[in-house]
Amino acid sequence: MPVLPSWLTDPLWDQFAALLPERPTVDPSHPLGCHRPRISDRIIFDKLLQLRFGCSYQAIADTTCSASTIRNRRNEWIGLGAFARLKEIAVQSYDRIVGLKLDQIAVDGSITKAPTGGEAAGRSPADRDKQGMKRSGMTDGYGIPLGRVLAGANRHDSPLLAPTLDLLEDLGPLPDGITVHLDAGYDSDKTRSELTARNLHGRIAHKGEKAPIQASQRWHVKRTHPWQNAFHRLARCYERRATVTNAFFDLADTIITARSLLRRAWTSHRWDNRPKPRLQQVPA
């Protein structure tokens, strides 16, 4: 069974391949004019998608490529900024076809495991002081991930709000009257001053009040966190470098955005190779 359906992976690969420079199959600088052929980029891309299950590089290595090849090609693509650019293209495509709800923004933190520590890890107060990682995620009014800030699990949500809101500058022109939905962890004068300085309206839950009474649209970001944690590579992160962790987050956010785009465009758009409904895919 494929890790993801072909109607999702094929468009992602076509766009990702367009971001990669052309490289010869055989190194022309080899003194004997021959060399072991370069492993196909598509094979490495499919291997990276398999890492969403949380397995190790050695577990997915086979006769097609080794674990070292996967790591080296991953680092090469990170240096090119391919993962960040792919996520940016996915968000722009969603905004152009469906439209981002940027007048309603939700920000919230989520703690995950980081057994091997790393640059973005710290003592987790939710896991007996084991190593953990916190991400301060931001979504639009539907739950499309717009960006995240990584920090140690022992960091409070409130100080991470400012660097998270700085990511709005990468989205281009913004609408007027943006409302930021926050939970009670951000209920402080410092947070309100930060929002006022950015000309943002804050809808913050108050400490001591039950959540159902003051429930707002911050549930969108709380739904996106499980979407990201479904990529077990992120829920239990063994990567030690923050650049690699961000690359996997960009890949996961791209898949989430593209999947939401296809589902929401299903009733309003038609295209020749549109996948059939699930009921029509079952053989008779």
Image (spheres, grey):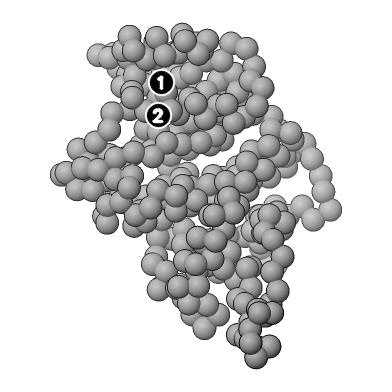
Question: As drawn, which residue projects farthest toward the bottom?
Answer: 32
Q: Amino acid at mark 1?
A: Leu
Q: In the rendered image of this protein, does residue 272 appear above or below residue 204?
A: below
Image coordinates for residue 126, horizontal then vertical, percent:
22, 39
Image coordinates for residue 42, horizontal then vertical, percent:
63, 68
Q: Residues within 10 Å of mark 2 (few under 14, many from 20)?
A: many
Q: Amino acid at mark 2?
A: Asp
- Asked whether residue 19 appears in the rendered view, the answer is yes
Q: Quadrant of residue 132?
A: top left
Classify residue 130 as left or right of residue 101: left
Image coordinates for residue 107, horizontal then vertical, percent:
44, 27
Q: Which residue is mark 1?
A: 182
Q: Earlier in the sequence, mark 1 or mark 2?
A: 2
Residue name at image x 82 percent, y 48 percent: 271
Q: In the rendered image of this protein, does residue 200 appear above or below residue 30?
A: above
- Asked whether residue 281 appears in the rendered view, the answer is no
Position of the C terminus, as image quadrant, is bottom right
Q: In the rendered image of this protein, does residue 110 appear above or below residue 243?
A: above
> Is there a contact, CB below 8 Å, between mark 1 and mark 2?
yes
Circle 2 — which element?
strand
Classify residue 81 as left or right of residue 215: right
- How far apart marks 1 and 2 lie (CA) works out to 7 Å
Image coordinates for residue 115, horizontal then vertical, percent:
26, 55
Circle 1 — which element?
strand
